Image (cartoon, grey):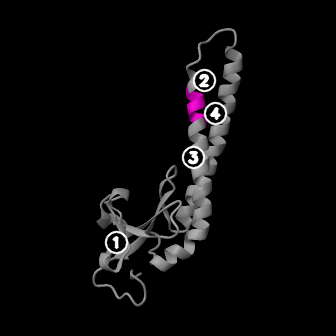
């Protein structure tokens, strides 16, 4: 999808994004922990799947079934966290890294305010198609033609 075809659910100012951070931090923290747990369980399932069959195969099969059930439940929880972020208008980008984007208008164009778990506030932005590698610091110089009296971004 090109940036021209994308319409976000909400447009944020820097102030609005930072006001949402306390709740976003909690959700992202839970999301990161759950994503790590799911990764570990998938690895365990992969290990169990490689076990040789033999007299103890019933033990392995029982553990495989248990891990599969846990994975299904935890995957549903993960989906719930992602849904919560989307309902807030925040776009999750990486569960493992704790990376989210807040749609915004920068210099009259649609862009993202970018926040990563551990950062004290929203400090970066990037163009829609630039991704994390294209992050730029939020400074007065990064926004041209904006009225800085009511924030760096126009909503």
- Which of disc 1 and disc 4 is earlier in sequence? 4
Q: Residues within 10 Å of mark 1 (few under 14, many from 20)?
A: some
Whether residue 150 is visible: yes
Taking 60 as reference, is 90 left or right? Answer: left
Residue assigned mark 1: 110
In front of the other: 122 or 78: 122
Residue 40 location (% of width, % of height): 59, 37
Whether residue 7 is visible: no
Taking 113 as reference, is 88 left or right? Answer: right
Q: Which residues are magenta?
A: 41-46
- Which of disc 2 and disc 4 is earlier in sequence? 2
Q: Residues within 10 Å of mark 4 (few under 14, many from 20)?
A: some
Residue assigned mark 4: 68
Q: Quadrant of the C terminus?
A: bottom left
- Which of disc 2 and disc 3 is earlier in sequence? 3
Q: CA distance from mark 4 to mark 2?
A: 11 Å
* Point 55% across, 76% down: residue: 19
Nearer the observer, disc 4 or disc 2? 2
- Which of disc 1 and disc 3 is earlier in sequence? 3
Q: CA distance from mark 3 to mark 1?
A: 29 Å
Q: Secondary structure at mark 4?
A: helix
């Amino acid at each position: 999808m090109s940036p021209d075809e994308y319409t976000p659910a909400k447009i944020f100012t820097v102030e609005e994004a930072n006001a949402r951070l306390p709740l976003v931090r909690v959700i992202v923290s839970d999301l990161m922990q759950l994503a790590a747990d799911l990764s570990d369980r998938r690895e365990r399932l992969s290990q169990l799947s490689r076990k040789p069959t033999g007299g103890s195969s019933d033990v392995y099969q029982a553990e495989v079934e248990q891990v599969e059930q846990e994975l299904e439940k935890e995957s549903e929880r993960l989906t719930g966290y992602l849904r919560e972020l989307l309902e807030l208008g925040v776009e999750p980008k990486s569960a493992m890294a704790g990376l989210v984007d807040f749609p915004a208008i920068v210099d009259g164009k649609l862009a993202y305010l970018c926040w990563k778990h551990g950062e004290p506030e929203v400090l970066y932005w990037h163009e829609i198609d630039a991704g994390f590698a294209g992050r730029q610091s939020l400074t007065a110089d990064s926004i041209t033609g904006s009225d800085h009296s009511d924030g760096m971004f126009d909503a």
